[in-house]
């Protein structure tokens, strides 16, 4: 596609609910990153994929957070048993294999946990 | 561990002024540095990307410089316009991890 696409754009969940956030990367982009952005702060790294391999998940805040990219394209970030502190914007970014190193971001998924 | 800071946290200027935003990082072994703009409720838009071997990049009214040895980058905006009002974020890449600063919130007053 022309850009990184994320869905849903907005999600309201009750505390304890599971949520799944989807990222469709730019076609052919090998690397995919997930970030969490709290209000008024810069994005914080969560996890990184190269193709289908999850090479770094050091930023995932707890074992309630899980990400996958089974076919090396679309990625899903799943949050189980959501808590209020999970409320944030979740940003997906990708970059190509012919690497200038430039990151391209989606619009983000804004999660509000009530 | 790479840490990125940005000064000032917020800035308000009258239209037409030239301004400088600052970014500092603790680990100089970076691959590149990227400046982004973020409008409220939106994702990040890439403004300029500076490779570690470069000293500066220019795009229109924007100029970004990089001094790796001192761990600093600046974003210079010439002749600011109300449409420049946004949050500006710098991000440094070490290997395959990209670390962001907290951003500078810019308001340009007509």
Image (cartoon, rainbow, N blue to C red):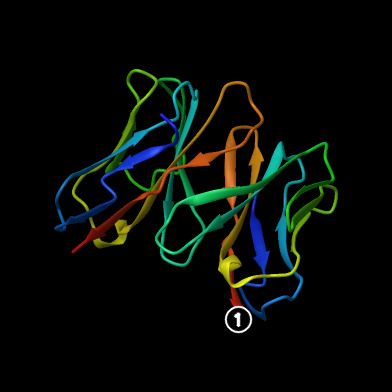
Residue B83 horizontal/vertical position (percent): 57, 67
Give the mark count. Answer: 1
> Farthest residue in the top direction?
A71
Element carrying mark 1: strand
Q: Quadrant of the N terminus of chain A?
A: top left
Residue A97 at x, y percent in the picture: 57, 21
* Residue at mark 1: chain: B
Q: Residue at x 59, y 57 (%)?
A: B89
Q: Horizontal and vertical percent for residue B77?
A: 73, 64
Q: Residues within 10 Å of mark 1 (few under 14, many from 20)?
A: some
Locate the C terminus of chain A and report the quarter of the image it occupies. bottom left
Would you place residue B35 above or below residue A26 in this image? below
Q: Is residue A97 above or below residue A80?
A: above
Q: Quadrant of residue A111?
A: bottom left
- The answer to whether one can see residue B1 in this image is no
- The residue tagged 1 is B109
Going 16% across and 58% down the picture, which residue do you hit? A15
């Amino acid at each position: 596609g022309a850009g990184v696409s994320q869905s849903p754009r907005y999600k309201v969940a009750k505390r304890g609910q599971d949520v799944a956030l989807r990222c469709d990367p730019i076609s052919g982009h090998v690397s995919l990153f997930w970030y969490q952005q709290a209000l008024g702060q810069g994005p914080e790294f969560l996890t990184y994929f190269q193709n289908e391999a999850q090479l770094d998940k050091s930023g995932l805040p707890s074992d309630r957070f899980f990400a996958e990219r089974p076919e090396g394209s679309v990625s899903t970030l799943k949050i189980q048993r959501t808590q209020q502190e999970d409320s944030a914007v979740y940003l997906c970014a990708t970059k190509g294999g012919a690497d200038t190193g430039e990151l391209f971001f989606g619009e983000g998924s804004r999660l509000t946990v009530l | 561990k790479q840490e990125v800071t940005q000064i000032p946290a917020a800035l308000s200027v009258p239209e037409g002024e030239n301004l400088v935003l600052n970014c500092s990082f603790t680990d100089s072994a970076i691959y590149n540095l990227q400046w982004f703009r973020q409008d409220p409720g939106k994702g990040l838009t890439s403004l300029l990307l500076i490779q570690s071997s470069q000293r500066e990049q220019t795009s229109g009214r924007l100029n970004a410089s990089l001094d790796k040895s001192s761990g600093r980058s600046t974003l210079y905006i010439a002749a600011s316009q109300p449409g420049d009002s946004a949050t500006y974020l710098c991000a440094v890449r070490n290997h395959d991890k990209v670390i962001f600063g907290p951003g500078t919130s810019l308001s340009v007053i007509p």
